[in-house]
Amino acid sequence: MSWNSRVERVAPFRVMSLLEIAQAREAAGHDVIHLEVGEPDFPTPEPVAVAGRDALAAGQTRYTPAAGLPALREAIAGHYADHFGADVDPARILVTPGASGALLLASQLLVGPGDRVLMADPNYPCNRHFMALAGAQVDTVPVGPDSGWQLDAPLLARHWQAATRLAMLATPSNPTGHMLDAERLHALADAVAVRGGHLLVDEIYQGLCYDLAPLSVAALTPDAFVVNSFSKYFGMTGWRLGWLLAPAAAVEPLTRLAQNVFLAASTPAQHAALAAFTPDCREILESRRVELGRRRDTLLAGLARLGLAPSLPPQGAFYLWLDISRYSRDSQAFCQRLLEEENVAITPGVDFAVTGGEYHVRIAFTTGTVRLEEAVNRLERFLARQ
């Protein structure tokens, strides 16, 4: 049977298959250490859970406006002002079903058949796939330590083509955890603007920074499109809630798209998310960020002992991107064997990188330090047999 050719351009997300296998092993009695999926072991913060329960009890289950609850859009705008010094009109914010909903809106508005999109390689695969579903051609730009694992202004100038309409980046990034500082981000925004293109910035891991202060492109320019989420920093993965910050001129067509594509985001989730911006919740979230920083340092120390620590440690998010070329040029087989032989689940690099994914893996430091130390010990045993 034949399907839409655009769907055929969407590759499977292999980490989900790996997660299924890992869960099956766990159900069979194996002690699996999960370092594969981007979901820390923290529950939703209690103030958010309480607000969600209260919303349900109060019958807050009817549709909201397509762009989201006015109070939530105002709270998000206040978050930009308080933490990033960005003056954002709440009318420029659209609340979406997860960051994926925001990516869907942005991709459908900004690109179409014949257009080209620039992205760093490696990157989060769904970013590429959303653009492909819109009919655009994605041009991936290989990055490494010399550019801080990021697309920057010199790389953009080298790879921009006549049909390029959009540059997309993530800071902090998935899978590498690296960031662009204000100077480099500003230079990139200027480089896109002088070429008459659009800039789309994935800030999903924005609050999870360890070495640099959190930064939003919204503080540098009102012309960028910004995707964010309540999943990562705010700990609301299963609530499926995100937002898109857009230039003022784009709000009306984006709202029309939202009305037709998903009508509105989950009403109980939106009411729950209001509590994410309270001082009590902020205290919980910051303590978790500090804990993730400890986990990062624990994992880096263990990998350094094995000679596997990255030359440029991640500055944010909760991932390490590791070169395993000394041991394998087939990251999928490497991860499969590690799971089967040592019950450690990590993600093959081919999920994220067009170039070099076959000899990289991603490790998520989403479990406690004792388990991370055990995972390193198991990895050491596994590598000794390679």
Image (cartoon, grey):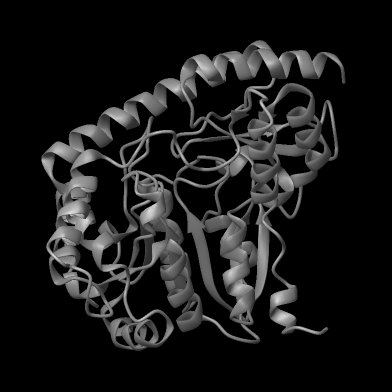
Image spot of residue 330 (x, y percent):
84, 40
Q: Is residue 303 visible to us here?
A: no
Is residue 192 positioned above or below 115 on the image? Answer: above
Q: Is residue 338 left or right of residue 365?
A: right
Residue 242, quarter of picture? bottom left
Residue 98, quarter of picture? bottom left
Image spot of residue 322 (x, y percent):
67, 32
Of 46 and 100, nearer the camera is 46
Of 259 and 358, nearer the camera is 259
Q: Is residue 325 visible to us here?
A: yes
Quadrant in which the C terminus appears = top right
Image spot of residue 175 (x, y percent):
58, 44
Q: Residue at horizontal 25%, vertical 62%?
A: 268
Q: Is residue 62 left or right of residue 29?
A: left
Quadrant in which the N terminus appears = bottom right
Q: Residue at horizontal 22%, vertical 54%?
A: 52
Image spot of residue 50 (x, y percent):
18, 46
Is residue 228 positioned above or below 61 on the image? Answer: above
Of 43 and 379, nearer the camera is 43
Q: Residue at horizontal 39%, vertical 85%?
A: 257
Q: Is residue 148 left or right of residue 180?
A: right
Residue 131, quarter of picture? bottom right
Q: Residue at horizontal 32%, vertical 70%?
A: 265
